[in-house]
Image (cartoon, grey):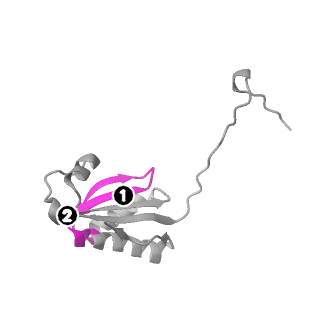
């Protein structure tokens, strides 16, 4: 067995190693209906949108790479605009009419449940 000695400057300090073990899950599926224009601006989304007739869809999922597949599903399922896909954090943000955003989120969730065996949280809305 090999012992490891901390340098004198590190003695008494605790080192924590975290490991991510992703499951197959959607942990957030949310619709923001008629968002305030500042939300669009802070997210870097198209500010020329008619805010009263639009919505923002937000999903968080793991493994993180599934965000790419979910983004593809979203544009194929509904008339939405992709705002952000992060294959490292598993975040997907898109915009469109309230009905289009609902349709895209439901299509993504249905596919992930039925085809890939994901656990999916309830869709929420504000």
Q: Position of residue 41 (x, y in %)?
A: 23, 48
In-image side of 7 versus 49 (left or right): right
In-image side of 8 versus 125 (left or right): right
The residue lying at 17 percent from left, 50 percent from top is 47
The residue lying at 50 percent from left, 71 percent from top is 119
Q: Position of residue 21 (x, y in %)?
A: 59, 56
The residue lying at 73 percent from left, 30 percent from top is 12
Q: Are marks 2 and 1 in contact (CB under 8 Å)?
A: no
Q: Is residue 93 above or below residue 8?
A: below
- Bin the neighbour count of mark 1 within 10 Å (Cα to Cα): few under 14, some 14-19, many 20 and up: many
Q: Position of residue 81 (x, y in %)?
A: 23, 60
Q: Which marked residue is nearer to the observer: mark 2 or mark 1? A: 2
- Bin the neighbour count of mark 2 within 10 Å (Cα to Cα): few under 14, some 14-19, many 20 and up: some
The residue lying at 70 percent from left, 26 percent from top is 10
Q: Which residue is mark 2?
A: 54
Q: Which residue is mark 1?
A: 92
Residue 94 forms part of the magenta stretch = yes
Q: Secondary structure at mark 1?
A: strand
Magenta stretch?
77-101
């Amino acid at each position: 067995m090999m012992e490891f000695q901390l340098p004198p400057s590190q003695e008494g300090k605790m080192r924590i190693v975290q490991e991510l073990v992703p499951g197959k899950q959607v942990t957030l599926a949310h619709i923001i209906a008629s968002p305030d224009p500042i939300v669009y601006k802070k997210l870097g989304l198209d500010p020329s949108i008619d805010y009263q007739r639009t919505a923002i869809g937000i999903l968080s999922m793991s493994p993180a790479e599934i965000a790419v597949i979910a983004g593809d599903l979203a544009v194929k399922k509904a008339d939405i605009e992709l705002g952000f896909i992060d294959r490292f954090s598993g975040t997907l943000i898109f915009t469109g009419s309230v009905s289009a955003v609902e349709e895209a989120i439901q299509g993504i969730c249905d596919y992930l449940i039925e085809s890939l065996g994901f656990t999916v949280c309830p869709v929420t809305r504000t």
